Image (cartoon, rainbow, N blue to C red):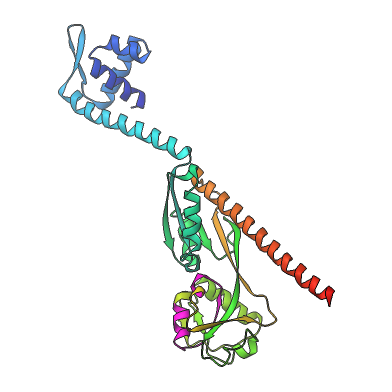
Amino acid sequence: MTLNQIFYFIKAAELENFRTASLQLHISQPSLSRSMAMLEEELGVALFEKTGRGIRLTKAGKIFYDHAVKISTDYDQAIDRMAEVAGGQGKIDIGYVFPLAGHYIPSKVRLFLEKKENENVSFSFLQDHSHDIIRRLRAGELDIGFGGKTDDPDLEFYPLIDQEIVVITPSDHPLADQRFVALEHVMKYPLIGYDPASWMGIHTRAFYETYDLRPSIPFECPDEYSIVALVRENFGIALVPVTDVLAQTAGITIHHIQGLDLYHQIFMFWKKDQYLLPSARRFIDYMIETSKAENDRKNESKQYLKDIIQKKKNTL
């Protein structure tokens, strides 16, 4: 059975005449008759019966007509839906790590949707650890992920954000009055760590091994929100990336690490061999363009500050 046979059958059933139907379908009457005979043979029932010069549906034909109309309607809707998708509409499924949930992802998506060509695009959101986001991406449950980088050859990674790693302490901590703290001083105090399965848990533990550090970690948490809450209540201090969570600094003090420029990178990633809807591809391009523009502004600002400092040195 073919779609053409379905369309031919509907036309013949509605016009109750093979000749009239063939004219409207732009095929010969013998071709239409053969097509309907083959359809009846395949279904094992008679769909039409003759009435003088015309035809009418049998009981079986009436039952099949209801299904044929539904198939035709579904076909038309599918074609229309695909035309919308090809034109840039559709749903984008994204997953991201906790630090991006408070402001970064919501603001980026809102700005993307405010563009005229994206007004009919929709999103579904998932917040999880990086390795779970990657697993869902590989399974086809997500289009785009945001989090840590792995050595997965099947994924394309693009660096979006460099987050400075800082030390946070309770406001009444012995280190609270120091803007910069040395790592050896940090290691003297209990550290609140990350869940070992999280990307930051893996990242910080690799950092401790690189610098041959042996911190005491009595508590482990899944995200910065939990860590900041425990630091505020004096359960310990912590190494965390600068995220939106640190904007609420009541009860904590933020310190830079002396002598080290430590950063945590956030990547956008997607499957190399997975077909992406035009809307998803457009969102990737948008994120890359905005990231480049933000980095250019940061570099210009840094260079401006360097120039001012140099000018002051030259005048001394």
Q: Quadrant of the N terminus?
A: top left
| Residue 113 horizontal/vertical position (percent) | 47, 49
Q: Residue at x 32, y 34 (%)?
A: 74
Q: Is residue 238 magenta?
A: yes
Instruction: Give the total of numbered labels.
Output: 0
For residue 219, side relative to residue 302 (left or right) = left
Q: Is residue 130 above or below residue 123?
A: below
In the rendered view of the protein, which quadrant contains the C terminus? Answer: bottom right
- Horizontal arrangement in the rendering, residue 271 relative to residue 81 (left or right): right
The answer to which of 117 and 91 lies nearer the viewer is 117
Q: Who's the residue at 28% across and 19% down the image?
A: 11
Q: Using the image as rendered, state which of residue 250 and residue 41 is in the foreground.
A: 250
Report whether 124 appears left or right of 186: left
Q: Is residue 272 visible?
A: no
Question: Considering depth in this image, is 220 or 172 the residue closer to the camera?
Answer: 172
Q: Please, which residue is most extreme toward the left here?
A: 59
Q: Is residue 159 visible?
A: yes
Residue 88 on image: x %, y %: 48, 41
Residue toward you, 275 or 246: 246
Magenta range is 226-246
Please provide percent x and percent y for residue 285. 57, 49
Left or right: 123 as drawn, with respect to 17: right
Residue 228 vertical placement versus 47 (above, below):
below
Where is residue 308 shown, x and y percent of the image? 76, 69
28 inside magenta stretch: no
Residue occupying image coordinates x 27% and y 22%: 10
Q: Residue furthest front?
A: 315
On screen, residue 302 above or below 293: below
